[in-house]
Amino acid sequence: MIRVLLALLLTVTAASAEPIRIKDLVEFDGVRGNDLVGYGLVVGLNGTGDGIRNAPFTEEIMANLLERLGANVTGEQFRPKNVAAVFVTAELPPFARSGSRVDVTVSAIGDAKSLLGGTLVMTPLNGADGQIYAVAQGSILAGGISAEGDAARVTQGVPTAGVIPSGARVEREVEFDFSRLSNLRLALKSADFTTAERIERAVNAEFGGRVAVMQDAGTVALDIGATGMRSPAHVLSRIEGILVQPETRARVVVDQRSGTIVMGADVRISRVAVAQGNLTLRVEESPLVVQPNPFAEGETVVVPRSNAAIDKTGTGLAEVRGGTDLAEVVAGLNALGVAPHDMIDILKSINAAGALHAEFLVN
């Protein structure tokens, strides 16, 4: 696993030097989706629906639906097992127009065992303002299967949730006139002052004037009027493809459950010694000051010299040169066959000692 990690690290290091399109680094102000939610009924289940005794709301919604269709069921007692009450969720994409279709997700809220083979009855989807923006209906594609006998039951996946591709039709458009905007903001997905400043310079170089202004680490403002173009859509289409080299923070992410370790190329460690069981890790810094000869032209420089050693009883000494680079320390640990979970414990100790110069995230 560690060899694969090192290979991925080298790949990420090479890729991090490549410029990225602005459209992949930012979100455009006003270009966003809206969440929709609805409460509906799924029919046609093969005896895997809600138990009406345990889910009275299913009976209520079914009675209301039948009455709207002209069937009077007031005071009637019915116990169908092929219906289930569900929540229906969807995202209304930006600039969605009336008649366009969106995908929906259907999730059981009662004690239904499976939605496999069910059909969602026409369900209105509401936005945060309470208005109906779409109507969903269609056959459900469940993502699991369940089987049971008298003394055993097996379930694979989640049969009580499914999707309906293109299952909702947009009935109302979001009132937003994008063409009238005179100013736009670019919101960085990962806030960083250096990246925001590079975006500002790249956009101004593209238009030959002061069009973009960095407001903070996560926002770059655009003046549409300064571009000489009247349409904000044309401005965004022009800057979307501009290449910018992003700057990222040094970060180490570990997952204790799976033993996964992911680290950035800029992660560094200082002089530190770690011992775990019969394993000892030492990293030492011995910088060398080099001065020019008397009366010679030149300047005094500091040449970094690092020495890292890993000592394990019974296996001799394994040396890693350039120990300030965490990737090389990991390579030395890999040479001794250190397990990923032991590697995580070592990284925790290095971070606790203040020698790991990176953001340390544990999942």
Image (spheres, grey):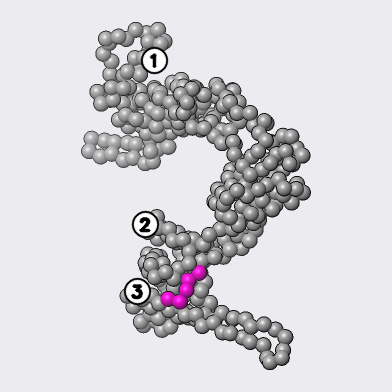
Compare marks 3 and 2 and give the one earlier in the sequence.
Answer: 2
Residue 86 lies in quadrant: top left
Number of marks in the rendered image: 3
At 34% from the left edge and 14% from the top edge, which residue is drawn? 63
Disc on res. 257: 2
- Tag 1: amino acid: Leu
Front in this rendered view, residue 3 or 195:
195
Mark 2 burial class by Cα count in 10 Å: few <14, some 14-19, many 20+: few
Taking the image as shown, residue 145 lies to the left or right of residue 190, namely left
Q: Residue furthest left?
A: 151
x and y percentages locating residue 166 in the rendered image: 54, 29
Tell me the distance, in whole angstroms, between the alpha carbons under discs 3 and 2. Answer: 20 Å
- Tag 3: amino acid: Gln
Give above or below for 49 relative to 273.
Answer: above
Mark 1 burial class by Cα count in 10 Å: few <14, some 14-19, many 20+: some
Q: Which residue lies under the disc numbered 3?
A: 276
Asked if the residue under mark 2 is in contact with the one under mark 3, i.e. CB atoms within 8 Å, the reply is: no
Residue 293 lies in quadrant: bottom right
- Tag 2: amino acid: Arg
Element at badge 1?
Answer: helix
Asked if the residue under mark 2 is in contact with the one under mark 1, i.e. CB atoms within 8 Å, the reply is: no
